[in-house]
Image (cartoon, rainbow, N blue to C red):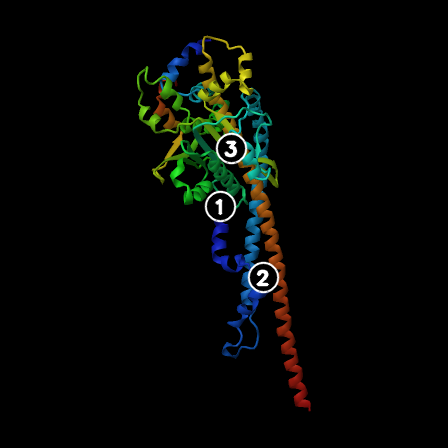
Amino acid sequence: MASNAAVPFWRAAGMTYITYSNICANLVRNCLKEPHKTEAINREKVHFSISKWEGGKPQRPSLFDLIHLKHELGWRIAL
Amino acid sequence: MAMAALRREGRRFANPLLSPRPITAVRPSLFSEEDGSMGVRNISTQVVRNRMKSVKNIQKITKAMKMVAASKLRAIQVRAENSRGLWQPFTALLGDTPSSASGHALQALFDGSLIFKSKLVAPCVDVKKNVIVTISSDKGLCGGINSTSVKTSKALHKLVSGPDKETKYVILGEKAKAILIRDSKQDIEISITELQKNPLNYTQVSQSYALIGGRVPILTKFVPKLTVSVLADDILKNVEFDALRIIFNKFQSVVSFLPTMATVLSPEVVERESEAGGQIGDLDAYEIEGGETKGEILQNLAEFQFSCVMFNAVLENACSEQGARMSAMDSSSRNAGEMLDRLTLTYNRTRQASITTELIEIISGASALEG
């Protein structure tokens, strides 16, 4: 149960449980063999656009896909 | 594709099609420009023929959209039904807490049409910071499901807001955004769209959670102690919440959708409530493994609960959307069919009338020659 000891660390890195478990899930997907690997990765595509609102005005929407998110959270350490 | 085509068609023919007047009332104006001028005797059937063609095209499009919605519905319905198993354990453990004493008021407000996900009599939880997550669709032509969820959200907003309370909207989907922007744009915190470009999946939905509210507890608990990451700015900007109220249309059947509210409390509130006893007090009966404290467990649990509830809610709403679109398209192709029948009748009558007129003219001319 190495994950128990890891909790404070990923919390400190600014991750939530969800982000952490998604990273883990992504790792597992990457461990699959080829035909299944692409299939699994394609199934879990992330795409949405999000815009924050300030003072009743939407800010510029930003597109989110997995690559952006990885970049933002520094996932490269984990991957 | 089909929808864009329909929009194009609709714009071109919007006037006659959408006019509330029955077709017979339009008829005189159709022919007035044709006959009378230039001494033309025969009534032109061109206008009616054109309209018949356009109505037929629209009917084809709505029929195609119905088929598409039906096939999409089947795929989503299975997933939505499977995803119900995700939130049920959480409801059993943490309860689903309708907001304070007002739960009944809200129910009364909707005449029993609003159901709460859980039948448990949950403890009264009155919190300061409410975030209402309104789930809607990106595309229209799907009946009233979007306006239902917006109406429910607005009522809830009215209900939970008070003097020292803060209520914010987080909006999923273009349609709710378009409605809420009119009168509550000051309260909108985040809007998320284009969620359905790829088939919905858990990763996607749970990622949106991380953006909605998940980072706040980190701010309060850990960031002061440890290195502030690049995210710190981002964190400060994000929504803080004590309770998330997720409003969506629960899929019941192709023709019935229930506006539903699901509540997710922040870990702090859950902890407070569990100290106070009541439904959540049962939590003490469970053993906690490992070296983590109850607070940490609850935080993880609350985050996971929200992502599960969201996943289910988004799927249910997508399912309702397709169902609503199916029935809406069904009725519009039926309407187009009825309209086509009426137009055909008009067309035939006019044609027959002109033939009869010609016959009468010929016969009377012939008899005039004889006589």
Q: Is residue B43 above or below residue B209?
A: below
Does B202 sit left or right of B369 as displayed? left
For mark 3, name the chain: B
Q: Name the one closer to the observer, B282 or B188.
A: B282
Query: Same chain for marks 2 and 3?
Result: yes
Residues packed near mark 1 inside 10 Å, few (<14), some (14 to 19) or many (20 plus):
few
Q: Which amino acid type is shown beneath numbered disc 2?
A: Pro
Q: Which amino acid type is shown beneath numbered disc 3?
A: Val
Q: Is residue A37 above or below residue B36?
A: above
Q: Which residue is mark 1?
A: B1
Looking at the image, which residue is at 55% across and 35% down? Answer: B105
Q: CA distance from mark 2 to mark 3?
A: 40 Å
Q: Say which of marks 1 and 3 sits in front.
A: 3
Upstream in sequence: badge 1 or badge 3: 1
Q: Position of residue B121 (x, y in %)?
A: 58, 25
Res. B252 mark? none
Res. B22 mark? 2
Looking at the image, which residue is at 68% across and 87% down? Answer: B367
